[in-house]
Each structure stands twice: as structure tokens, then as C-alpha cells.
Image (cartoon, coloured by chain):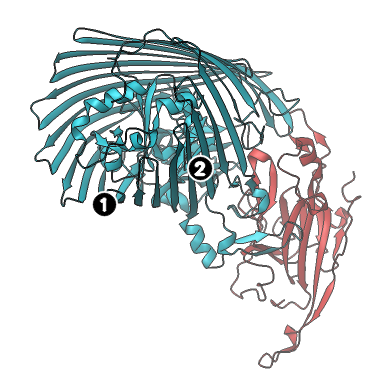
Chain colours: A cyan, B red
Amino acid sequence: MRSANIVFFLILAFTVQAQVPDRRDTMIGRDMQEVVVTATRSERLMGNTSVPVTLISQKMITESGSLRLHDILGEQTGLFITQGFGRGVQMQGLSPDYTLILIDGEPVIGRMGGVLDLSRLTVGNIRKIEIVKGPSSSLYGSEALAGVINIITDGAGVRKLHADIRYGRFNTFDASAEAATRVGKMSLSGFVNSNSTEGYSLLPNSIQKTVEPFWRLTNQFKLGYDFSPATQFRLGIRYNHEDITNSIVVQNLGSQLLSKGSEINRDLNITPTLTHRFNKKVKTSLRGYLSRFASEQNLDVRGELNNYNDRFRQSFSRIENQTDVDFTDRLSMNAGGGMIFESVRSNRYDSLETLRSNQIGYFFIQQEWRALERLTITAGLRYDHNSAYASVWSPKLALQYRMNPTWRLNASAGRGFKAPDFRQLFLNFTNIAAGSYSVFGSLVAADEIMRLQSDGQIDQILPAYGKLSELKPETSTGINLGLQFDPSARWNARINLYRNDIENLILTDIIAYKKNGGQIFSYLNISSAFTQGLELEGNWQVHKQIRVSGGYQLLVTAEKNVLTEISEGKVYKRDISSGLSSRLTRSEYAGLPGRSKHMANLKVFLESSDSRWFANARLIYRSRWGVSDIDGNGIINREDEFAKGYLQANLALGRQLSPVLGIKGGVDNLFNYKDPENLPGMPGANWYLSLSANFLKSKQPSKQ
Amino acid sequence: MKAIRSVSVVLSMVSVFMFSCDKNDAPTADVGVVTTATVKDLTADTILGIAVTGQPYGSGKYTLYSLERNAAVSAADSASNKWDIGFRGTSIITNSGNSGPGVGGAFVFTGLFDDLKTIPSDSTFRVDNAPASYAVPNGSNKGWYVYNAPVNLVTAIPGRVLVIRTGTGKFAKVEILNYYRGGVTPASTASEDDKLRKQRFYTFRFAYQPNGSLKF
């Protein structure tokens, strides 16, 4: 794995600046010398990017014993893994809806309730993960509002034959195999992963398991053909299959309703890319992307004739060109444009026959200018023209000032946006079981209410109905201000201050009442909020064999209209013992739910001098976070409205038994922390044991 | 029927305030003896069982209450102006419109109970028009409570005061404090059975102005 990193490093060595001292002797020095692509959509040394970038290496993923993407992301500074519609990632205090997830530069689709379930993604063949914080819509368009997480998978090219099996608690079984070879101008690689568990129950005597048994299969193939050193073709095909057993108990006004069935999610991605370098200064790439996601849930509801059946099919196709031009060694540019065709069929929106679609045309341009020897300015702009909702301009400006080789100052400001999704536009859902409420997407709500009105079913239409109009994309303005301190190859530190102002937040609101008392909801741009705080990170190579890293994030959030209401004295609370109401003060308002004010991590990595064995301990802390309103004022303020903060300790230990065979074991959540209500995905202490075999030792030159 | 059997009205606090004459406020009509009291565990059609449909059911009767006398009123007196408000589940009726023969009415004031010292003279009192509408709007987040479906709990919204015109045309203000027995909302993790058995027990405080003025 390390060799793969080094190869990549060598290929791109031409970007290395001469004055940077050689720091490749330590992991810490190497990290700063790593090439990252996500921040600027072109290769840059990590230390030279002017926006906050975190890099997770394959070595780190392997040694941490991670299986799925959320495992490793949850151990990073400032990332919070949410539970609900699967595992999502919260970045700089923004919901999972607002972080764009890419695999090899292409967006992953299949969000449910706005959340892209990260547990769908195996980390088995990930070469590295790049995390860019702050709005990046100027390069990536919709969803890149909080930031971008780009998963870069193993490339074809290096000969490889590798297999891995792992067994853990709850009969969790994971197996991967990977092979890669190169024949003349052609390179080929294949990867397969199977992941299954029997699940577990955190609440005794419950029929429904907290985590139901599932089986997941991932296949990935890559093909490369080099027509010449200047012209290269790459093709990637990835197929994911997920089969989850469902046994659901619904409490319906005191009685229990048992449903049995299954949920199957499948996604397929095909990515052909053609790149051509015209000369030293000009490079262009043409990328195609075809992605399909299908989800199907079938439930046999006991005692009901009509079984529950849910179908959702999403398609995302894109064609894009990007051209990079280095005008001089001080001025470079990348520019591009493309078309996106998106569509959804679902019985949640009318019927499977109805195709809901959106076309997006876009272009972007980014210039990087080394204005002074010490100052680099990056400016970018993107325009997205949509057929289903309002169009958006996304600018960004970033600069880096290198005071001296040790200190660097980074500042960036940009706009991000998230387009209204199909659910917010087209959902047509009525829940007869729970109070007969309905949720209508903003584009279908008016028609649906007119239909109900002509049937005489509408009791009252509320003022919010009048606000139904073309849904605007949710937008944010993000500012990041960072300082990097890089005194030696032994240690480094950085601090980053951030603030995100989000406008036009889309929330559901009641627009009408039915005569039977049922509420009718729709989606409206009704709120604005902010998140702000600071992030600290440090790395220290204590000794050749000992490395320590630590991180901390402070996060403060608020809904702006709540703040206004508090200052006007219009927000009240109820005392838990006296039952009396009183006015709420600003300090009592805990901000948006699901946010921890403090998050921290401390990791210690040990490695023997001959690299034969490793061991590590990772401590992850989160302070309490708001769950839901209990005292009736709609906001988080009272002690009993929070989930408790906790400390999690993960340990791993591994040894290379022979050049081929390696063994690894570990315990996650050593302190056996459990909170079934708020952390259903945390089953207490969780052990595992794994074996890996490397049949082909890479013949690439080792470091240096 | 145990409709009113278990009504245990506890006067936890009956404080009588004497309002002294304001220098500029000469009319003696404004000087009244305002009754302020807290009523605990007033049953409001408590649940008798679960129907085959899964819906809980009670006797279906309103518990009527006189704010003037600070006591429950027998259902036999429902067709009189002896009662001011009635409770059944989350529904609250006033002795007005088609709920009763009185001259009552109500509206929901957003603010603190203690801050409402004078009912604005241009206030509009709504009357009951059952089952379409009530003076105190029924429904989650429409009047005095919010229903949290995922945890199946009813919570009285803080900062909501029911401004009541009584059956005889006097004025009162009421703040609902809790909907569960003993004035304690069950934990969200409590059993469904517990949540059902303990609900429909009102704890509320009120101030009653017997002299017909709008001041408390």
C-alpha cells in the first residue's frame, strides 16, 4: 500500500517545488508531500492547497481495521457519523445531505431521506480518501455545500494479487480479493468484496433487531489502455448489491403490527475516461458517467391484505470535459463543462410509470495564479442551469500565503448549493396508519390540494400554502481561515476557523389541514442557519516507531429565526419540576439538533522498525448532542433533550507472519459504550480477527 | 362510568391577591379578587381499553369544570352555564357555540401567564362549532399542545395561555401544564402501555377574575 502511494508520488513529482526540504523520512513529512486532486480538480501537493484538506491513506484504513466507509470517517477530526437512513457524515456541523460523496471523482447516487448510506461502501480497495472542507460547488456543483469526500480506489497498473478474510462478533464475515496486472499497453484490475452479518438486538425482548441481517457484495473492474504516453483510456465498472432482511414492528396506537420482508439496494456505475496531453502545458479529459440505483422493499404485513411495496429507481448520467492549461509556471487554469441527465421512477411519486427528470447543463472555470513568490490566489466559478428548479452561480476565492517554510496562511470563501431533490419536488405520500398525514413535493402540492378540495376533503388552508412556489436551491456561504505550522518532519499542527451561513434551508411545513384532522405538509424554503467553529489538528513523530496524532473541533450552530425570536422574547420553555413556562435565554438554546459542541480524537500508532508488526489505539470523544424537543417549544434546550456524550476506544494489532501472510485483530468500542436509543449502530465492544495474503509482492521501487 | 369518579382536585395553591387601586385608575370595578389556583390530575376521559382497530377508547364524555367555583361540574349540568371549560383527551371545549348554552368563548394567547395582566379589549373570542372547529383549536401545534408521533407523547407547548370567557361572561386565563398523571410526562423510552395509562390527566393553573373586568 505504501508503495502505491510512492508510485503516485513519483508520477506527479514534477509538481514538487524545489524549496521544500525532503521530509519523506516520516509519515508526517510524507503526508504534506502527498498529492491531492479533490481540492482543485488537479494534482496539488497537500501542503500547497489553500483549503482545508484531510488525507486518509490506505495504510491508515488497513491498520484501523475499518470495513465500511463510515468506520474510518468516524475517526476523523470534525466528522460526525449520523444514524438514520443509514450512516451519513456531518461535516462542519452540516447535515449529510450537504456533503458530496465521490468515488474516483464521480458522485455516488441513491440518497434516502437526503442521506447517502456510507455503509454501502467498502473500504477494501480504497487507495486513499481525500476530504475537502468548505463549499466546493464552484468545482462540483450541487451537494458540495459542506465539502467533498473523494474516495480514490486502487488503480490498475501495479501488479497485485491480494486476498483478505475477516471474522468478527455477530457472525460478521468479510472477504475481499483483488488482482491487477499489466500487459503491454493494457492494464486490468478486479476487486470483489462480500460483507455480511447476522445483526444484533440492543433492546432485549424486542422482535425487531436493532440491526437486521444483511449481505453486501461489491464488484469493481478497471481497464486501462495507453494509446501513447500522452493518450490514455480508462474504464471503471462498479456494481454494488445489498440485501437486508426486514422484520419491522410498528406501534400503531398501542397495538403492534409485525411486517416481514426484505430490502434490496443495487447500484451500478460505469466510468469511461479519455485523457490526452497535447503538450507540456495543455491536458484535456473527456469523462462519461452512467449510474443507476435501484431500491426495492417488500413487506408482508401480518393481518393485512395489501402488502407494503416500495420501489425507487434513480438514474444519473453525465458527460463532461475538463481542460487544464498551464500558461506559465505562475498561472494555470482548468475549465470544463458538461451535461447531466437525472431521473427517478418511484411509487412514492405517483407510480412507477411516471418518469421524473431533470437536465442540468454546467460549466466551470478555475484559475490559479502565483501572484507573488509567497502568495497563490485561486479563483473559481461555476454555473448550473437546471430544468426543474432555479439556476445557480457558485463562486470561490482562495489564497495561500507562505510566510516562510514553516508557516502558511490559508483563506478561502465560497458559495455552495444543494439542488432540491426529487423527494422535495415530487413526493406524494399519505400515511393512513399514523394520523392520515400527507407529504407532497413542492411541484405537486398545489394540484394535490386542488384535487382534495374538489373532493371536499380540505378543512383549512394555511398561509404557508401561499408561499409554495418554485423551490430555490439551498445555498451557503462558507469561509475558512487556516494556519499551518510545519516546523520539521517530526511534528506539525494546523488550526482552521470556519463559518457557514446557509440560506433557503428546505424544511417541511404544514400547508393545510384535512377534514379528518390530517395535516398536509410540503417543502418550503423557510429557514436559515449557521455553523461555525474551529478545528485543531496535530501530528507528532515521538520516536521512529511511535506516532501520535490529535484533533479537536468546536462547533456552534443556530437557526437564525430562532435567534431572532429569542431576542424578541418569543421563545418559551417549561420547567421540568414546576411545570411553569418562562422565557428562554440565548445561552439555553443549543442550536441545531444532532450536533456535538466538542469532538476530539487522540491516536497512537506503533510500528516495529522492520515493519513486521503494528499496533494502535484510537480514542474518539463526542460531547452531548440534541436529539429532539420534549418541552414543546420546538428547539433543543432542556437537559433531557440531549443524548449523552461518550468516549470510544478502538484498538488494533497486526503482524506480518511471512512475506505472504499477515494477521490482524482488534476491538472497537473497548469500553463497551451503548446507547440503544441514539446510537443503534453501536453494539458495544466489537472484536474481529483477519488474515491477509499478498501473493505478488509489488516490484515497484521502495521509497527513495 | 368512572368519568368523574377519580377527579381529585388538589388546590395546591389558592392565593388571593388584593389589587390596590392605581392612582390614575379610579374605577373600583377593576379592583377584584382574582382567584389563582393549580388543578392537578383532572381526568379527561381516561383510556378504558384498546379497541380492535388499535385505537384507545374512553367513555367519550367531557369532564366539565367551573373556574368560578374551582371544581368539576356534573355531566348532568352540561346544558347550563355552570361550567366554563371541558376536557376530553386533548380536546378542550368552552361553554359556547354548540358546546353549551353559556356565553363563553376563548382564544389562545402566545406569551407568559404572568405577563398577561390585561386582556386586550379588541381581542376576538372564538366560539365552539363542533366538530369542525373549537374556540381552543384542537390538533397538534394548533392550540395548546404538540403531539410527538415517534415517541407517542403529548406535550403542552410552553408560553401558551388559554384566555377564557366563562359560561357567565366573566374572564379567566388558563395555562395547561401537563397532560399526564402526577404532572410528569413519561420518558420517551417508557412502555406504550405506560404512556396510554398515564395520559389524559390534566394539570393546569388558572386565574379567574370574578368582577367581569379584563384585568388580572
Query: Would you name the residue on which mark 1 appears?
Result: A404
Quadrant where the N terminus of chain A sits is top left
Disc 2 secondary structure class: strand
Q: Is residue B80 visible?
A: no
Q: Is residue A180 visible?
A: yes
Query: Would you name the residue on which mark 2 appears?
Result: A521
Name the image quarter holding residue B92.
bottom right
Task: Tell me residue A109's x, y (percent).
Answer: 38, 27
Quadrant where the C terminus of chain A sits is top left
Does residue A203 appear left or right of residue A400 in this picture? right
Whichever of callouts 2 and 1 sits on the residue coming sooner in the sequence is 1
Task: Tell me residue A89's x, y (percent).
Answer: 47, 36
Q: Nearer the viewer, residue A407 or A630?
A: A407
The chain letter under disc 1 is A
Q: Residues within 10 Å of mark 1 (few under 14, many from 20)?
A: few
User: From the viewer's perspective, is residue B8 above or below residue A173?
Assistant: below
- Marking on residue B47: none
Task: Tell me residue A93's x, y (percent).
Answer: 47, 46
Say what amino acid the circle numbered 2 marks.
Phe
Callouts 2 and 1 in the same chain: yes
Q: Residue at x 63, y 35 (%)?
A: A434
Name the image quarter holding residue A472.
top left
Q: Nearer the viewer, mark 2 or mark 1?
A: 1
